[in-house]
Amino acid sequence: MDFSNANSVVSLMNSVLAPSSAVGSSIGGTDAAKPSVDFGAVLKSSLDKVDASQQKAESISRSFEMGNNDVDLHDVMLSLQKANIDLQTAVQVRNKFVSAYQSIMSMSI
């Protein structure tokens, strides 16, 4: 089982939480604790992995459709399901971020 997508989601969540802890420490006047992970880079990396799994599934599917004897139907179905799970995970993470953003925006100051 491939846990790279789960690890990228965990690292994405850690990168989201890192700036909030840095803000709390910078209120005291010290700028020593800077977040070491760039949110944009982690997000791009995660989306690139989802895109790569989609491209791989499409490539394997096309190979099977063209009659390549090295590709089994089993491999095609597994790669398509992995790509589908990766995409569903990315959509759910996006939905959580949008929900959190809307919650923050609706807070009164």
Image (spheres, helix red, strand yellow):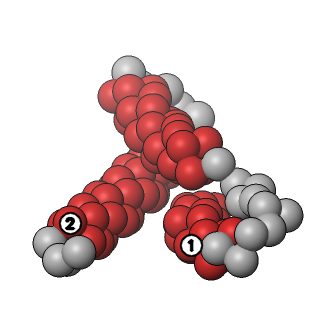
Q: Which residue is mark 2?
A: 105
Q: Is residue 81 visible?
A: no
Contact between marks 2 and 1 (CB within 8 A): the answer is: no
Residue 76 vs residue 49, the one in the foreground: 49
Of residues 58 and 37, the one nearer the viewer is: 37
Mark 2 vs mark 1: which is more N-terminal? 1
Residue at 27%, 65% in the rendered image: 101
Q: Is residue 41 above or below residue 7?
A: above
Q: In the image, which disc is placed on residue 20?
A: 1
Which residue sits at x=47%, y=44%? 47
Q: Quadrant of the N terminus?
A: bottom right
Near-viewer residue (24 or 97)? 24
Amino acid type at circle 2 is Met
- Report the residue that reaches farthest toward the top: 66
Res. 78 visible in picture: yes
Check disc 1 and give the amino acid type.
Answer: Ser
Element class at badge 2: helix
Question: Whole-Å distance between the Cαs marked 2 and 1?
Answer: 16 Å
Q: Nearer the viewer, residue 29 or 85?
A: 29
Can you give x and y, in whole percent of width and height, for residue 22 in the image? 67, 70
